[in-house]
Image: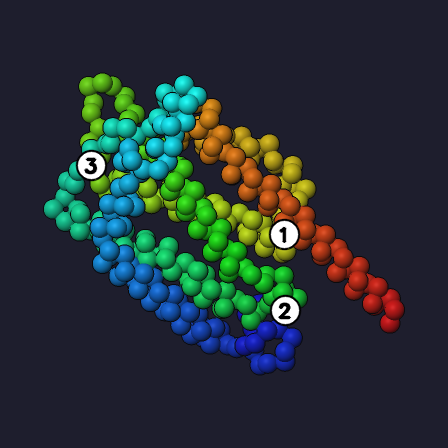
Amino acid sequence: MLGKKKKRGEGEGEMTFLQHLEELRWHLIRAFIAVVAGAIVAFVFKDIIFDHIILAPNNPDFITNRLLCQLAELVKVPVLCINQNPIELISIKMAGQFTTHINISLIAGLILAFPYVFWEFWSFFKPALYEKEARYARGAVFSASLLFMLGIMFGYFVITPLSINFLGSYRVSDLVHNQINISSYIGSVTSVALAAGLTFELPIVAFFLTRIGVITPEFMRKYRKHSIVVIIVIAAVITPPDVFSQILVSLPLLLLYEVSIFIAARVVKKRAIDDAAREAAESAQ
């Protein structure tokens, strides 16, 4: 599949397996350097990364917390006012905070470098595509990067505050008090944000899976009800026990699923048009 040095159909000689590995190695090296560069920037700006980003959703002044409290006062639903008593964070290991600093810097480096990292991988696979296939996938890097960043923002500004409020205040007994380890807190925040970022890639995944015939719009429509149930269950688990919060989390995910169906339908329609045009050309000959 990756047997051509240039785009398939250009008549270039095939690359050997070792040549492919060598080319992939350099793509990985450049991507790794970009991540490390982003990590160094994040490491230097520690105060911004931790005080104003990572730890901010635990603060009553965080924008999501403030807006929900204003909404709670407006609609007279007090449960919507979340994170008014910040959870207590502790570090229980000697090198705990330094290790956390390193880990967060690497994760921040990956997020900052994501568009370039995706472009490197795309550059490796693109020469194996036919010209028509490459044309279909035009703008993939921009679209994937935009969706990833939107997912990160949704996870950070919406899901994270709700998760902190629920998990940080949940108790099995009044005799047990929560003192959250900083690594546990940060692990939850970063995993939620990254998971949301990857989830927002669903339209891109649907596009490529439809192109290669793995899924169809009919398949996605058939299992729409199942996806709705899964999304609602996830929203119910991570949000406070009120309908508004569940809707707040569920709607964007349901919208993504519907967008994916639309994209899959467009791909199938375009393929049918191309097939009809090709058959007409062959008949004319």
Find residue 89 and name its label: 3
- From the viewer's side, name the closer residue of 244 and 126: 244
Tell me residue 90's x, y (percent).
17, 38
Q: Is there any visible trace of residue 151 in the rendered image?
A: yes
Distance of mark 3 from mark 1, alpha carbons? 46 Å
Q: Residue shown at 65%/75% (left/top)? A: 9
Tell me residue 31's x, y (percent).
38, 65
Q: Is there any visible trace of residue 167 in the rendered image?
A: no
SS category of the residue bearing label 2: loop
Q: Residue shown at 38%/22% (left/top)? A: 73
Mark 3 vs mark 1, foreground winner is 3
Question: Disc 2 or 1, which lies upstream in sequence?
Answer: 2
Residue that numbered label 1 is attached to: 210
Residues at discs 2 and 1 in contact (Cβ within 8 Å): no
Q: Does residue 6 appear to the left or right of 104 in the view shown?
A: right
SS category of the residue bearing label 3: strand
Question: Disc 3 or 2, which lies upstream in sequence?
Answer: 3
- From the viewer's side, name the closer residue of 80 and 226: 80
Quadrant position of residue 177: top left
Q: Residue shown at 32%/61% (left/top)? A: 38
Quarter in which the N terminus is drawn: bottom right
Find residue 130 and name its label: 2
